[in-house]
Image (cartoon, rainbow, N blue to C red):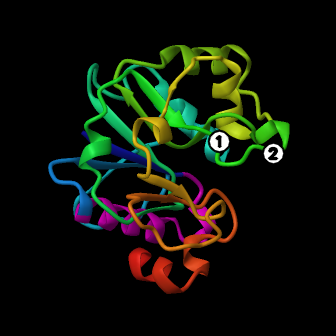
Amino acid sequence: MLIACVNAGNYLKRGREYVEKLHRGVRRNLNGCEFVCFTDDPEPYADGIHKRPLPHDGLNGWFNKIALFKAGVFQGGERVLFLDLDTIIVGPLAKIAAYDGEFAMLGPFFDSVSDAFAGNQSAVMMWRGGFGSEIWDAFQAQGLPNISGGDQAFINSLDLKPEVLQELFPGSIMSFKREEGRAPITESIVCFHGLPRPHQCGGWVKHYWS
């Protein structure tokens, strides 16, 4: 299992901090995985974080996630769990990491959002290495469009019909906003997807994130 994240352009001006805290959360909750950060940050990261260059030059922010689907970025058959940096790992990941399907994304946390951000969410994704080259090829063929809604809007436009992580692993993934900041109960993954960010929170969030 390979855990992947992206830090492009020094996320929130504290990208290394976010990467290292995500890594610590993963390390506490999953054995036998490799943690990889795709980044343009030249600074050294903590032991156990394998830095790789961004797979394609010149992409803005979240569109760097689409480049992870380029052919050759991951080995064929390699299992990939992608996590956004504003994600906190609060419990065991072994059950989620055992997913062996082709492609899964988060389903929507809210029923009513702007059209640009409707549909499946890319803050947590899982796939098999070798899958997804058509995502990158389509993005490149359309001229690397900087569309509203970002990478997930583009992925959703392709109608790939991914499996939904909340359906595969009920009670394992929560939205901080949807749950109005309540502490996790059975959940292993907490997604922030916008404000507030983990570093802006106290209480149980600070405990897990720090």
Query: Would residue 174 appear left or right of 74 to someone viewing this image?
Result: right
Residue underneath mark 2? 112
Q: Amino acid at mark 2?
A: Ser
Task: Determine whether the residue tagged by mark 1 lies in a helix, strand or loop.
Answer: loop
Q: Who is closer to the viewer here, 38 or 196? A: 196
Q: Is the residue 179 above or below the residue 7 in the image?
A: below
Instruction: Say which mark, if any, is on residue 108.
Output: 1
In the rendered image, which quarter is residue 27 located in? Answer: bottom left
Q: Residue drawn at (65%, 60%), measured in percent from left and top?
A: 178
* The disc label shown at residue 180, or none: none
Q: Quadrant of residue 92?
A: bottom left
Secondary element at tag 2: loop
Residue at mark 2 to residue at mark 1: CA–CA distance: 9 Å
Question: What segment is highlighted magenta in the picture?
Answer: 8-28
Looking at the image, is 195 positioned above or below residue 205? Answer: above
Please, is residue 96 above or below residue 210 in the view?
A: above
Category of crowding for the residue at label 1, using alpha-carbon neighbours closer than 10 angstroms: few (below 14), some (14–19), many (at least 20): some
